[in-house]
């Protein structure tokens, strides 16, 4: 009976904690700041009799200009440049969101290990702690996830039906695409001359 | 007779001569009524393509068939890699096929052979480690990662993935050690920032601070210092943030991006409601930075004064800006009297006598080059304005007389 009461109590506390926002670990959380800003904007809009959808009317010209500037995106990298250091870093950052930070386990590990903040040359390097099965499972699942995403990396290009056929085969077509990419800009003039039938006297 | 033809051996000349049909004479040289184009030929060829011949799909029923299949595939792959040793794609396919057959020892040996061919190829390392990780061979994976990271320390991707693996497995101390190893190679900003983010994920603020200090030593750039200061602000440590800014200003006052630093510093002081300090910073910055780059700084300063300053401060700021513009103009064109006039008007509106006089004197010093009337016309107007100014605004009769005397003398 007592145990049931205790269990109820803990469940209640947990739910209450979930209801209210978690304690701010560092400074003001982004959510809270966004909510406050929304409220302020809402107040000013009401004062002017505007709707939430017309929130842009409140921007000054400078603010609007900076917003437009943000919308102008840099050209997306193509070819091998897709794997430039910046994008690789962003990919790593995205993956770190999958990490569940378990602070209790972390603190337990901290107690257990005297050399928790180890230097680069520490001799503890090879000695890894026992890893629980579910962690390994999670890691494997994440890797499989990544592989799925990788499969959908290249997009299928449009098939232009109106283009001239210059191949007898699918392999031939693929080859023609490759050499067009490599030599296209140099042979353009020659090709035009051939189409016309005569070369231009330039 | 046969030996006299050493090239022909046992054959005679009669056997080896080539008999071509006699070329007929072309009778009709007009074009044929139906012409064909190259495109038509290609289209026809395409249409008449037969389907690709594929070997039939076979189901493997027992272990001998499986062994046969594997033997065949292995032979195929080995032939391929013998033919083109440097084609990493084939090596990868081979290794991944062995992985799919669940023969990990063979797969590992293939990977190692591939690494012998080209150990500098980071994709090989990545795929090798991924194979070990996916099949739950954690210590094998660690071994591979360690080798990769020792051989190719400047490829960040390897470090990222190694650390990510350790963090996913919950081996935080190990991840930390790897980070430390990486930092001893002084990677670029993103490496340091990922280390700091890692520490902050576990709320280790003091360690993060230590790392930030090393970071700004390693990358002494304005953006690094500003990031450090913003980190302190985020934790609410105002005194520390101020100390950081001050250190930054000390070290980087002559940097080419110093104005960004000053602007950030001043904004920080504004946020702390320390307007006097902010003003001092702006003034110091304006003195320090050459005029060419101070544009943005001026704008911010004017905006700041409009918010917090009193009328005099605002006017001073605005006037200062205009003053710079005019200085620029008159430096470029000392004989352009229009700009001189504008400058003088500005100074008069401010009402600072010493400065006005100074500007007048400088203006008069620019005597026109030739004895032509039109140059001298405007020049004379300068003198007249000067005399009037002295008479009316400064109420200084003595000086007025001096001016008139000087003019009449010339």
Image: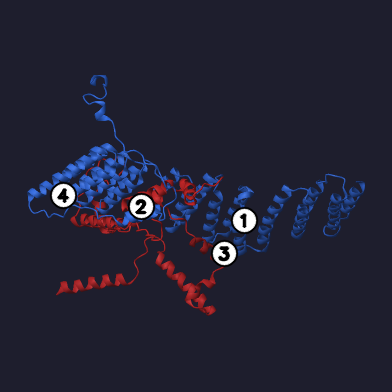
Chain colours: A red, B blue
Does mark 4 fall on the same chain as mark 2?
Answer: no
**Disc 4 designates what residue?**
B102
Q: Is residue B56 in sight in this rendering? A: yes
For the residues carrying marks 3 and 1, which lies nearer the camera in this image?
Answer: 3
- Residue at 85% across / 60% down in the picture? B392
Q: Using the image, name the chain to which the residue with label 3 belongs.
A: A
**Nearer the N terminus, badge 1 or badge 4?**
4
Chain letter behind tag 4: B
Where disc 1 sits, the SS reads: helix
Left or right: B221 in relation to B86: right
Badge number at residue B5? none
Residue linked to disc 3: A62
Q: CA distance from mark 2 to mark 4?
A: 42 Å
Whether residue B66 is situated above or below residue B119 in the rendered picture: below
Bin the neighbour count of mark 1 within 10 Å (Cα to Cα): few under 14, some 14-19, many 20 and up.
Answer: many
Disc 2 on helix, strand or loop?
Answer: loop
Q: Which residue is denoted by mark 1 in the rendering?
A: B298
**Mark 4 packing: few (<14 Cα in 10 Å), some, or many (20+)?**
few
- Residue A156 placement: quadrant: bottom left
Residue B111 is left or right of residue B158, and the answer is left
Report, in whole angstroms, how far the alpha carbon at label 3 lies from the one at label 4.
Answer: 62 Å
Please provide percent x and percent y for residue B365.
81, 46
- Dot 2 falls on which chain? A
């Amino acid at each position: 009976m007592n145990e049931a009461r205790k269990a109820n109590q803990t469940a209640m506390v947990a739910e209450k904690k979930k209801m209210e926002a978690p304690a701010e670990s560092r400074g003001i959380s982004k959510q809270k700041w966004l909510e406050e800003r929304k409220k302020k904007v809402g107040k000013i809009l009401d004062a002017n009799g505007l709707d939430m959808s017309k929130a842009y009317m409140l921007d000054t010209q400078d603010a609007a200009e900076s917003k437009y500037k943000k919308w102008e995106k840099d050209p997306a990298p193509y070819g091998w440049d897709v794997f430039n250091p910046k994008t690789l870093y962003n990919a790593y950052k995205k993956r770190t969101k999958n990490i569940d930070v378990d602070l209790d386990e972390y603190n337990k590990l901290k107690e257990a290990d005297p050399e928790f903040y180890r230097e680069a040359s520490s001799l503890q390097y090879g000695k890894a702690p026992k890893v629980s099965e579910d962690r390994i499972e999670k890691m494997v699942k994440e890797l499989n996830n990544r592989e799925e995403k990788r499969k959908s990396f290249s997009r299928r290009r449009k098939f232009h039906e109106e283009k001239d056929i210059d191949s007898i085969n699918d392999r031939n077509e693929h080859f023609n695409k490759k050499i067009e990419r490599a030599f296209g800009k140099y042979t353009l003039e020659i090709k035009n001359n051939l189409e016309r039938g005569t070369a231009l006297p330039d | 007779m046969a030996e006299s033809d050493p090239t022909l051996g046992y054959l005679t000349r009669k056997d080896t001569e080539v008999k071509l049909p006699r070329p007929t004479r072309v009778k009709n040289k007009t074009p044929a009524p139906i012409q064909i184009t190259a495109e038509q030929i290609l289209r026809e060829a395409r249409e008449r393509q037969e389907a690709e011949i594929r070997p039939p799909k076979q189901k493997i029923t027992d272990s001998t068939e499986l062994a046969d299949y594997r033997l065949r595939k292995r032979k195929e792959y080995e032939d391929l890699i013998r033919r083109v040793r440097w084609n990493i794609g084939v090596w990868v396919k081979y290794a991944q096929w062995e992985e799919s057959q669940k023969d990990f020892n063979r797969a590992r040996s293939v990977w190692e052979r591939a690494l012998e061919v080209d150990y500098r190829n980071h994709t090989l390392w990545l795929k090798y480690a991924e194979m070990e990780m996916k099949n739950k061979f954690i210590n094998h994976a660690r071994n591979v990662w360690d080798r990769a990271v020792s051989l190719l320390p400047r490829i960040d991707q390897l470090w990222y993935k190694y650390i990510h693996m350790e963090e996913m497995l919950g081996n935080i101390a190990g991840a930390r050690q790897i980070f430390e190893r990486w930092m001893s190679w002084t990677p670029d900003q993103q490496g340091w920032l990922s280390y700091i983010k890692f520490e902050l994920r576990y709320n280790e603020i003091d360690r993060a601070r230590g790392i930030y200090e090393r970071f700004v030593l390693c990358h002494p750039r304005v953006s690094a210092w500003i990031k450090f200061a913003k980190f302190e602000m985020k934790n609410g440590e105002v005194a520390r943030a101020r100390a950081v800014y001050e250190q930054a200003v000390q070290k980087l006052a002559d940097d080419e991006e110093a104005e960004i630093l000053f602007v950030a510093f001043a904004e920080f002081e504004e946020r702390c409601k320390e307007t006097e300090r902010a003003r001092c910073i702006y003034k110091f910055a304006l003195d320090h930075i050459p005029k060419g780059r101070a544009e943005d700084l001026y704008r911010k300063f004017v905006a700041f004064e409009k918010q917090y300053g009193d009328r005099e401060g605002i006017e001073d700021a605005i006037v200062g800006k205009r003053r710079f513009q005019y200085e620029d103009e008159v430096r470029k064109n000392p004989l352009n009297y229009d700009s001189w006039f504008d400058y003088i008007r500005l100074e008069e509106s401010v009402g600072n006598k010493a400065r006005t006089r100074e500007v007048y004197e400088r203006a008069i010093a620019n005597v026109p080059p030739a004895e032509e009337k039109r140059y001298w016309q405007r020049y004379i107007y300068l003198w007249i304005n000067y005399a009037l100014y002295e008479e009316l605004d400064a109420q200084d009769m003595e000086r007025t007389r001096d001016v008139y005397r000087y003019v009449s003398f010339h």
